[in-house]
Each structure stands twice: as C-alpha cells, then as structure tokens.
C-alpha cells in the first residue's frame, strides 16, 4: 500500500447520499452510496472470481462508517449490507476508475435486462396435456 492511497478524511452527505473522500496526496472525490454498494469488496458481491450483479440499489444510503484498523473502513448500508471492508487502496481505485467502472456496471445491467426479457416462453397445449387423465 502506498502512502498516497491513504484516506485522511471521510464525510458522508446524507441528503445527496455521497461519500466525500480526502486522500493523503491532497486529492478528493465524492462517490455515491449506490456506486459503493454495487462495488462492495465483500465476498457476497465479489463472488469467487465471478462478481454478482447487484441491482435495485438506487435509493441505498449509508447508515454508518466503522474504522477498520489503519487500513480501511466498513461501510454499513441502510439495506443491511455491511460485510465488506473498503481498504484505502480499493477506495482510491474506485475513485480513479469511477467513470469506467460505472459504465461497465450500467452495461452489465442492460445485458442482464435484455437476457431477462428474452427468456423463451413455452406454451403448453391444454387439450394435449389432459390426455391420459380421466375426468
């Protein structure tokens, strides 16, 4: 971990649902609670090399922030999710690649929706399905 990845200050803006981060290198950014939730570092979201697509988190907020040693923070979301520890370098990564990561997430949502809409429907002929049954 490089010293520049250390977060010096966190401030959550409840109304806008934005987490403001100030890094040791003097840079700062704000990340939406939804973005942080869908990119949680937890095993539940990251899977085992196959990330889970988290949906329906547009209204999610942050209930509290819990320090995790000197290396990160546990973000407790108001949907009950709190199992991921956001290490400082991971937060720096999310900040540095926000646009790209958000576009990838939106594309995954679009693809999942298209796949869901294209599920074939199998119709059963009611007249043939009753053959062999006595009335």
Image: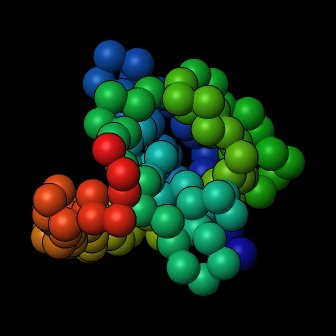
Q: Can you say whether 70 is above or below 41 in the image?
A: above
Please give the name of the residue rendered at 36% of the width and 51% of the height, measured from the top-left corner. Answer: 134
Q: Is residue 16 left or right of residue 12?
A: left
Of residues 26 and 55, the one nearer the viewer is 55
Please give the name of the residue rendered at 54% of the width and 79% of the height, measured from the top-left corner. Answer: 50
Of residues 23 and 11, the one nearer the viewer is 11
Q: Is residue 106 left or right of residue 36?
A: left
Q: Can you say whether 48 is above or below 38 in the image?
A: below
Hey, which quadrant is residue 4 in on the image? bottom right
**Residue 82 visible at all:** yes
Outermost residue on the bottom side: it is 49
Q: Is residue 67 left or right of residue 19?
A: right
Q: How is the image coloured?
A: rainbow
Q: Can you say whether 72 is above or below 105 in the image?
A: above
Quadrant where the image shows the N terminus = bottom right
**Residue 110 visible at all:** no
Outermost residue on the front side: it is 134
Residue 51: x, y in percent?
Answer: 51, 72
Q: Is residue 112 left or right of residue 18?
A: left
Hey, which quadrant is residue 30 in on the image? top left
Residue 37: x, y in percent?
Answer: 48, 46
Please give the name of the residue rendered at 42% of the width and 54% of the height, measured from the top-left corner. Answer: 54
Residue 92: x, y in percent?
Answer: 50, 64
Of residues 33 and 9, the one nearer the viewer is 33
Quadrant where the image shows the C terminus = top left
């Amino acid at each position: 971990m490089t010293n520049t990845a250390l977060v010096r200050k966190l401030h959550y803006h409840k109304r806008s649902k934005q987490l403001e981060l100030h890094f040791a290198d003097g840079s700062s950014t704000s990340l939406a609670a939804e973005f942080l939730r869908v990119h949680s570092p937890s095993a539940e979201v990251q899977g085992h090399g196959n990330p889970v697509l988290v949906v329906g988190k547009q209204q999610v907020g942050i209930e509290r922030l819990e320090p995790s040693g000197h290396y990160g923070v546990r973000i407790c979301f108001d949907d009950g999710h709190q199992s991921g520890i956001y290490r400082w370098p991971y937060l720096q990564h999310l900040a540095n690649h926000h646009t790209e990561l958000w576009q990838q997430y939106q594309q995954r949502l679009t693809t999942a929706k298209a796949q869901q809409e294209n599920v074939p429907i199998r119709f059963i002929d009611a007249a043939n399905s009753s053959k062999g049954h006595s009335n």
